[in-house]
Amino acid sequence: MKRLLPTLRADQTSESLISVINTIQIAAKEISFRLHQGALAGVLGSTLDENIQGETQKKLDVVANQLLKTLLLESPNVHAIASEEEDSIVVSPNSGDYLVAFDPLDGSSNIDINGAVGTIFSILRKPGGEASGESMFLQPGKAQVAAGYVVYGPATMMVLTTGKDVRTFTLDQTVGEFLLTREKAEIPDSTKEFAINMSNQRHWGKAISEYIADLLQGEDGPRKKNFNMRWNAAMVADVHRIITRGGLFTYPWDKRNSAKPFKLRLMYEAAPMALLIEKAGGKASDGYQRLLDIVPTDIHQRVGVILGSAEEVEKCVDYHTKHPKPD
Ligand code: F6P
Ligand code: MN
């Protein structure tokens, strides 16, 4: 079975990019090991708890961030990182060619219930010329040179694109290597499965309310088919299902909190997932434009997300076209 790095080499991926992906896989293996140790690893619970050595016990999302941050900043090929867990970007003393944005542990509320969680990453080229500081990162998703996620479920899998096919590698726990288990993800165009947090229904805008109401009518409604719903409460796990067998995932605009009308972050959640979904034949939109075309104005910017099987995303976008964008 093919290992991760030789597979990338066979693709003519540059050695500098391979080295960044290698650093991410090293961190991911360590995160995977600690997650699979569960309570034995002493990483569950609050950051305020103390472990038996009397040290401050760290929550796994803090540990995951620290691992990725430390390893990436040591890499000669990384210039700076942006993380969900860091207020600002962190610039490396090394003058590498790449910028890495990541969500170290997506869906972290699943940790305490032994549910699937993940790491999401987006790799950008450091721009030439004037750009410095945070502005270096403010590139549209279509500029990503690579994007991927690691899902820590019953098996640990890395799903990755370097701009070509979307490949799946499964961590062989016996030898500690990610091995190629799916050459090319292909998302079916149509689906009967959707993923949304239905408990927010009363807060939604018109577009998504009408779209979901029509789905729920099943065979008797305008869609003339019965839909099934799935919600993992971890974007990585929901997107992984879609990469595997299709479906539609959305976290739409809602009016629960006017200061935070969107939940998911563009740079290290929506954009990398959008690249994977498009490269696997699906579509990704904020309801009004292609997610990969959005130019970020802030590294922690939030955005509406609709992604998955192409025909279903187009359908959902049709409802948004009928209703103006909410403020
Ligand atoms: O990172 C944000 C996130 O945890 C996603 O992984 C997930 O899709 C979503 O939030 C879950 O939201 P909710 O708590 O509304 O189910
Ligand atoms: Mn997340």
Image (cartoon, rainbow, N blue to C red):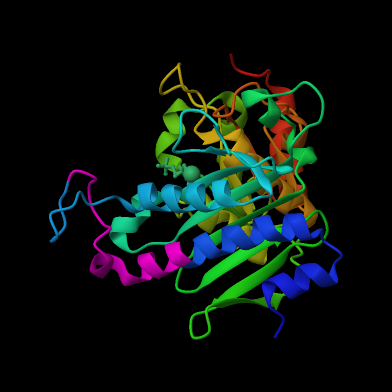
Relative to residue 281, is residue 92 depicted above or below? above
Horizontally, is 45 left or right of 268 in the view? Answer: left
In the image, which residues are magenta?
30-48
Q: Residue at x 63, y 63 (%)?
A: 22
**Visible in this render: residue 11?**
yes
Q: Residue at x 41, y 70 (%)?
A: 33
Horizontally, is 323 left or right of 29 in the view? Answer: right
Q: Residue at the right extreme?
A: 12
Question: Predominant secondary structure in magenta?
Answer: helix
For residue 208, which quarter of the picture? top right
Q: Residue at x 72, y 67 (%)?
A: 167
- Tell me the quadrant of ligand 1: top left
Give coordinates of residue 251: x percent, y percent.
Answer: 54, 38
**Visible in this render: residue 233?**
no
Give coordinates of residue 253: x percent, y percent.
Answer: 55, 28
Horizontally, is 49 left or right of 85 in the view? Answer: left
Give coordinates of residue 273: x percent, y percent.
Answer: 65, 48
Assign the N terminus to one quadrant of the image: bottom right
Give coordinates of residue 182: x percent, y percent.
Answer: 71, 74
Q: Residue at x 59, y 47 (%)?
A: 249
Horizontally, is 162 left or right of 76 in the view? Answer: right
